[in-house]
Image: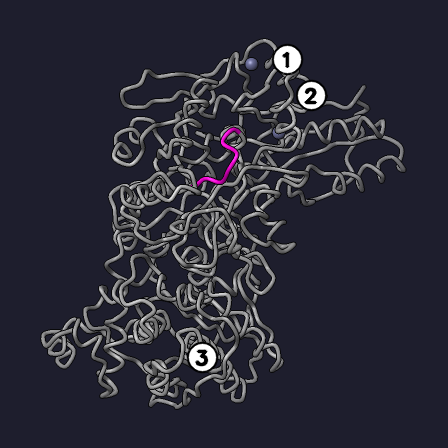
Amino acid sequence: MQGVGYRPYVYRLARSFKLTGWVRNNAGAVEIHAEGDSECLDAFAEALFLRSPPTARAHLLARRVAPLESNAAFSILSSAADGERHVSVPIDLASCADCVAELHDPGSRRHRYPFINCTQCGPRYTIIRDLPYDRGNTTLSEFVLCSTCALEYATPEDRRFHAQPLACAECGPGIHWQEAGHETVREACALDAAVKALRAGKIIAVRGVGGYHLLCDARCETAVLRLRHRKGRPAKPFALMVPWAGEDGLEQVKLLASISQSEAVSLLDVSRPIVLLPRDSRAAICPSVSFGLPDIGVMLPYSPLHHLLLEDFGAPVVATSGNVRAEPVLTGIGEAQARLAFIADGFLHHNRPIARPAEDPVVRIVAGVARPLRMGRGTAPFEVELGYRIDIPTLAVGAYQKNTIALGCENRVIVSPHLGDQSTPRGRAIFAQTIRDFERLYGILPGRVVHDAHPQFPSTRWALESQLPATAIWHHHAHASAVAGEYRIETPMVCFTWDGVGLGPDHTLWGGEALLGFPGNWRQVGSFLPFKLPGGERAAREPWRSGLSLCWQSGIPWRKGELRGGALLRQAFDHNLNSPMTSSVGRLFDAVAALTEVCLESSFEGEAAMRLEALCKSPEEPIAMPLTRDEHAIWRSDWHPLLASMLDGSQTQSIRAAQFHSSLAHTLLAQALAVRNETRVNCVGLAGGVFQNRILTEHALQLLTGAGFEVLIPKALPLNDAAISFGQIIEARALHAATN
Ligand SMILES: [Zn+2]
Ligand SMILES: [Zn+2]
């Protein structure tokens, strides 16, 4: 409950009901002692939750009769530290409406001050050095409050009472602009210089809440192409930040995309995520923002600095992470200045230190529900309450790409924000720092570490070197347990875990599995006919390899692929050299994208699947994929019949892409039915990055519900590898409970 002005809220409410007593923080919870006549007490108890501040996701821990204290009035007491420790690290909050109004009010003391905030808004997670959440424990400790701010801070009736990041132009942080060959300018002049640079088509780096962004004019093709070139990012879509405009703030967004009610709600969420929206063909942004993909990622300004910058500029900007390649976003002035020097023409810095990175969260509406694709600023640390207790405090280190870590203790799991992948030294450093921070802030000392079964992942190596008792969890078991954990399911279900690749218990690369069971007890019951991946890991970046493999395995000629593959690769394929077996649906998407010539090489993860999905215009009839049983009684879908249709150049790419999606949805249904016939299990879960595909997931959901299945699709946590750390904790706890 910390960091959202809950105690002052209780104080004002209690006084309005003429109650006496007190409110205080007690080890992460809020404790209230209220005395008065019974009618007022009941009304108070009811109003407490009804009128609670929107950001305070409050729930009642306990209510009991207490001895009378007959206090003179109602007051706010200093924190107590008895009772069970139940610490929550507060999350960063987007600027609230009151603060934005004040930001624009020429009569206000904080008119156009880029760090205005209150108890309902402002940074939290990214400024906290230690708990309890008091100013002295944040990165604002070095800014001494002026007398006016100090008075606001100390006045219970003020909406800035105990607002820890409280600041004003006199006493708080400021901004400055640095550009090679120019003098450094500050405050209003810095903002003007940044806007001028954007107008001139320059690329600017802006220090925000959880790190730097790289910004440029989204209407200016040369600027966007220059950013792509300098960042080494040829095609992956860029996110946009759009000025807040109109009554609902969405006026400018509506010029770019037609938005549904749930998309509007997501855009305005207090985390202000990037929401993937269908781009309007008339949108005044240049083509290179998303290069032919129909969805654009859009977010609204979330800090006062972004409000001012976007408003002054007056048009959408590209807003991409200020990082190098796959590294976590940069946070420090010095490191940003050094490492982004070849990308940014100028820097808009501020001097409020960032304690740890948090990237923008990403959301997509699938089957009518907002589903996170990435957790970050404003949505993490994310806490999941469990229906049982975890006896040994457990640390889970996740997998490799899109990684997160998680801590499990008592009846909850805390999941970190997106930490990026583990391929770079900075990625591994932020990973280790986040583990240290989480253990310290939450006061949890893990007695066990859980890691992916893949021996080469840096996270696995970190876990094995940690001296803690370690448990390895199969990648897809963790995916399935994440679904079961989120929905608190402990009875048998069939979970389809479709993704890129992960190591399976049979030592092939899984990625198209149906798992039957419950946490601690998963059994493979469905899959695809396995195929080779010539070149191993390179196949993920070069879809033609998967396409060629399917053709070679079927004896079907495919000139386009053979020209690339050559005799050496054929030899390796024939002799099983660096050609691991896989049942990955992600690689099937790659193969189809290559055979249809939609995407032969991909410049970013998931590109082939995204381009295929984008081509689907109207539903097509499925191509039947025979379902046969192998010697281990696993149902396997046979992809052979797809090849002829996918290679049939007389059909448009759009028709072939839709046929493929439909075939996958139908084969998923066929597997679910085959398992239900034998086991009567009627609950189906979907997990893995493949189901970020809206066409496939919505079609599969429709077929499954039509056949009477209960279907569980993650909505609290991402269904990609960001949920692996959470799933590892659920799975490990179940395994240990079963053996004890
Ligand atoms: Zn505010
Ligand atoms: Zn001040």
Q: Position of residue 715 (x, y in %)?
A: 55, 58
Q: Mark 2 highlights which residue? A: 158
Q: Residue at x 58, y 65 (%)?
A: 367
Residue at mark 2 to residue at mark 3: CA–CA distance: 61 Å
Q: Crowding at label 1, few (<14), some or many (≥20) Cα neighbours within 10 Å?
A: some
First in sequence: mark 1 or mark 3?
1
Q: Crowding at label 2, few (<14), some or many (≥20) Cα neighbours within 10 Å?
A: some
Q: Position of residue 397 (x, y in %)?
A: 36, 52
Q: Position of residue 144 (x, y in %)?
A: 50, 13
Residue at mark 1 to residue at mark 3: CA–CA distance: 67 Å
Q: Position of residue 593 (x, y in %)?
A: 34, 71
SS of the residue at dot 1? helix
Task: Answer above or below: position of 171 versus 587.
Answer: above
Badges 2 and 1: C-beta atoms under 8 Å apart?
Answer: yes
Q: Quadrant of the N terminus?
A: top right
Mark identifier at residue 165: none
SS of the residue at dot 2? loop
First in sequence: mark 2 or mark 1?
1
Residue type indicated by callout 1? Leu
In the drawing, does residue 231 fall left or right of residue 127? Answer: left
Point out the stretch of residues depicted in magenta: 312-318
In the drawing, does residue 719 fall left or right of residue 607? Answer: right
In the drawing, does residue 506 fall left or right of residue 660? Answer: left
Q: Mark 1 highlights which residue? A: 151
Residue type indicated by callout 2? Asp
